[in-house]
Image (tube, rainbow, N blue to C red):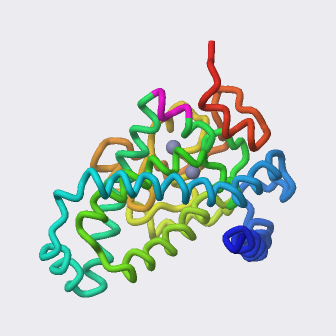
């Protein structure tokens, strides 16, 4: 129950922070606060956390059993003895590389795409659209990321600090803001960068998989970030049901 109240509180705080910013600095001015799909995204925000946490816990137990032979307490003590900033940098790099490939697989393996397509079904982007993620899609990404983190054994402080920053950043890059952040170009992902990933423009298809570090897209040939223009339309060709439960069920439904 506490988690549920925590999610309501987080929703309220984020609403208070992002609503005025998106109103004043809107990228797509026609987008309303009470847009299509808002109710569904609120339900994703409130309830996915439980489902993702349960799924991640099960994934973590399985990973701990499967990979325990790779864990060395001496090696983990060595990792944990490094300065905070060094552990933090290592954790950011390792998580980003793993998340990049998990995300790329989610777009290229049809079974995984069935789940990830829920996240791409938003036709208007704002901070709350970040919540529209199928819980099993999120569990898959987390499972891929957990393996090296578990083996290396970073301290809780390092991982906790990174988790908070990355959750906030993940919400921010979906927001409907027109700031271009050109000084961050190629260094850290920005709203415009991730908006291209969600766009329905054919030239941006299967581009910008990086969650935080665009150099991974540059390195692996999936970078798309034109200077002169931004994306104008978002979404997928498939027809996604509007309701929350229908979206949870969507990957399991047969298609012709
Ligand atoms: Zn994607
Ligand atoms: Zn996204």
Is there any visible trace of residue 24 in the rendered image?
A: no
Q: Compared to 148, does 201 lie above or below?
A: above
| Residues shaded magenta | 110-114
Q: Estimate the x, y position of residue 171 in percent, counting from the top left.
A: 61, 63
Q: Is residue 195 left or right of residue 239?
A: left
Q: Quadrant for the N terminus, please.
A: bottom right
Q: Is residue 64 left or right of residue 200?
A: left
Q: 37 or 61: nearer the eye?
A: 61
Residue at 37%, 42% (x, y): give it: 222
Residue 56 counted in the magenta span: no
Number of numbered tags placed on the structure image: 0
Q: Compared to 177, does 77 lie above or below?
A: below
Residue at 33%, 53% (x, y): give it: 63
Q: Is residue 130 left or right of residue 102?
A: right
Q: Estimate the x, y position of residue 183 in percent, counting from the top left.
A: 45, 70
Q: 35 or 167: nearer the eye?
A: 167
Is there any visible trace of residue 104 in the rendered image?
A: yes
Q: Compared to 144, does 179 lie above or below?
A: below
Residue at 17%, 74% (x, y): give it: 73
Q: Quadrant for the C terminus, please.
A: top right
Q: Estimate the x, y position of residue 255 in percent, counting from the top left.
A: 62, 17
**Quadrant housing residue 108:** top left
As drawn, which residue projects farthest toward the left? Answer: 74
Q: Main secondary structure of the magenta part?
A: helix
Residue at 67%, 70% (x, y): give it: 3
Q: Compared to 88, does 125 lie above or below?
A: above
**Quadrant housing residue 134:** top right
Q: Estimate the x, y position of residue 151 in percent, counting from the top left.
A: 24, 63
Q: 112 or 209: nearer the eye?
A: 112
């Amino acid at each position: 129950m506490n988690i549920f109240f925590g999610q309501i509180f987080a929703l309220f705080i984020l609403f208070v922070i992002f609503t005025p910013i998106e109103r004043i600095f809107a990228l797509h001015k026609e987008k309303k606060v009470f847009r299509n799909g808002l109710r569904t995204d609120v339900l994703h925000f409130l309830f996915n956390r439980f489902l993702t946490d349960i799924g991640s816990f099960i994934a973590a137990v399985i990973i701990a059993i499967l990979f325990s032979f790779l864990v060395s307490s001496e090696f983990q003590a060595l990792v944990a003895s490094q300065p905070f900033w060094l552990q933090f940098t290592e954790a950011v790099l390792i998580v980003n590389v793993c998340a990049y490939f998990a995300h790329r697989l989610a777009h290229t393996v049809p079974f995984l795409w069935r789940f990830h397509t829920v996240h791409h079904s938003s036709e208007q982007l704002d901070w709350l659209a970040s919540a529209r993620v199928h819980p099993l899609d999120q569990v898959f990404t987390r499972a891929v990321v957990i393996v090296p983190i578990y083996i290396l054994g970073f301290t809780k402080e390092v991982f906790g600090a990174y988790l908070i920053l990355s959750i906030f950043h993940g919400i921010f890059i979906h927001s409907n803001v027109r700031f271009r952040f050109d000084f961050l170009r190629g260094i850290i992902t920005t709203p415009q960068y991730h908006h291209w990933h969600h766009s329905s423009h054919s030239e941006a298809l299967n581009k910008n998989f990086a969650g935080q570090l665009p150099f991974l897209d540059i390195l692996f040939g999936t970078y798309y970030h034109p200077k002169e223009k931004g994306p104008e339309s978002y979404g997928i060709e498939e027809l996604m049901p509007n309701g929350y439960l229908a979206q949870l069920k969507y990957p399991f439904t047969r298609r012709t």
